[in-house]
Amino acid sequence: MLNRLDMHHGNAFKIGLFGSNCSSGRAVTFVPERWTGSWRDNLKLAQMADEAGIDFLLPIGRWKGYGGDTDYQGETLETITWATGLLAHTRRITVFGTVHASLFNPIIAAKQCVTADHVGEGRFGLNIVCGWNEGEFEMFGARLREHEERYEHAEEWLHVIRRMWSAPDEYFDFEGRFFQMKGVRAKPKPFGGTDPLIMNAGASSAGRAFALRNCDAFFTNPALSLEETRRNVDAAKAAAEAANRPMDIYSVGVVTCRPSRAEAEAYRHYAVVERADWSAVDRILAMKNVTPDKVSEKEFQEFRLRQANGMGGMPLVGDPDGVARQLADLAATGIRGLALSFVNYNEELPYFCAEVLPRLRRQGLRH
């Protein structure tokens, strides 16, 4: 039976991979083994993850990189075509496309998503992005809307898409604030007669409200402690239940797993401190208005380290027992799953799957 919301698996705690469609992945580092982001490496990773029982792949929607000495994320694969290709070469894993609603006409986006969904026989998911980096929007000659308006636009955009996915075969017109369409007709419909899984990662109150009204899964920003994570999850779930829309809560993590904790900590320090691309890190922080003249020196250095280490994802560092314990502790907060990144996915994922996943299975978190 097709079960999109469960990503076709019965795993209590979901494990996904995040950002592999970008060069360097999410580690802002000079190390020579950093991720290439090439199609060949992505295909190898997807097939390895599929065989190992990883639940999903989540790409970053990016149109140009952050620069720096490594040209961080300077080479990226477009996400819907990337997902379609990977779905054609896998059997079980869910693959998301990440779409900027302001840049994609909803008719085109709806058709692209359905095509990918048929290729994957119901394993495609849609990650909606309502804002983004202003410099990337300028490439398209597009205007980055005011914050509240971004979500109003995205809600209407999604309404058009869902109507195309579900409407009977006859034509329909649509008259809204942002879209005026005549004689719309869309065939085929999504695979199996159910819509793709939809997620969003808005950090603001407007973003959370949008996700509550429209999405199946919500990605919350990493917290600095388990207590804060539990509070954030509880608040999001309570809001979802009040809106009568139960929702799964996810977050992102960065794994450094080695046979001993000392080895893991040494490699993390080497990759994201000694060999960090600080020029790229500082450019990223400046785009977020985090500069030495706006925060204290101590805060600025903390921001820099978090940014270099997987763009701010939760650091999961240690031996297999330690990493499995950290994941189990996060699962206990109510988080449904994590999207993980590595310095080099293909080199590090086999050890993670061989050593960490069995420990999670013994704890009842994975099949």
Image: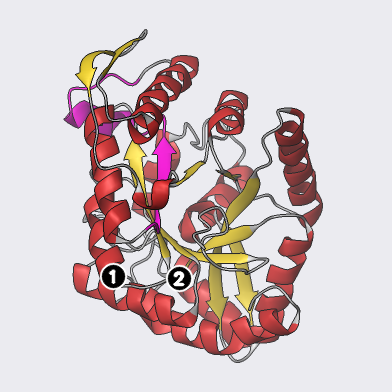
Can you give x and y, in whole percent of width and height, for residue 367 in the image?
63, 79
Q: Nearer the viewer, residue 92 or 43?
A: 92
Residue visible at 57% across and 81% down?
Answer: 264
Question: Do tag 1 and tag 2 residues touch (Cβ < 8 Å)?
Answer: no
Q: Residues within 10 Å of mark 1 (few under 14, many from 20)?
A: many
Q: Is residue 67 visible?
A: no
Which image quadrant for residue 31?
bottom left
Identify the element where label 1 is drawn: helix
Identify the element where label 2 is drawn: loop
Q: Nearer the viewer, residue 191 or 198?
A: 191
Q: Is residue 35 visible?
A: yes
Which image quadrant for residue 317?
bottom right
Say above or below: 183 vs 119: above
Going by the numbered disc 2, the residue's amino acid type is Phe
Is 219 displayed left or right of 280 in the figure?
right
Is 129 displayed left or right of 250 in the figure?
left
Can you give x and y, in whole percent of width and height, for residue 104 in the image?
25, 31
Task: Find the distance from the CA under tag 1 to the CA under tag 2.
Answer: 13 Å
Residue visible at 53% across and 82% down?
Answer: 352
Question: Which residue range is magenta in the image?
Answer: 122-144
Q: Residue 342, which numbered label?
A: 2
Residue visible at 18% across and 23% down?
Answer: 141
Q: Nearer the viewer, mark 1 or mark 2?
A: 1
**Total marks placed:** 2
Say above or below: 250 vs 141: below
Residue under numbered circle 1: 42
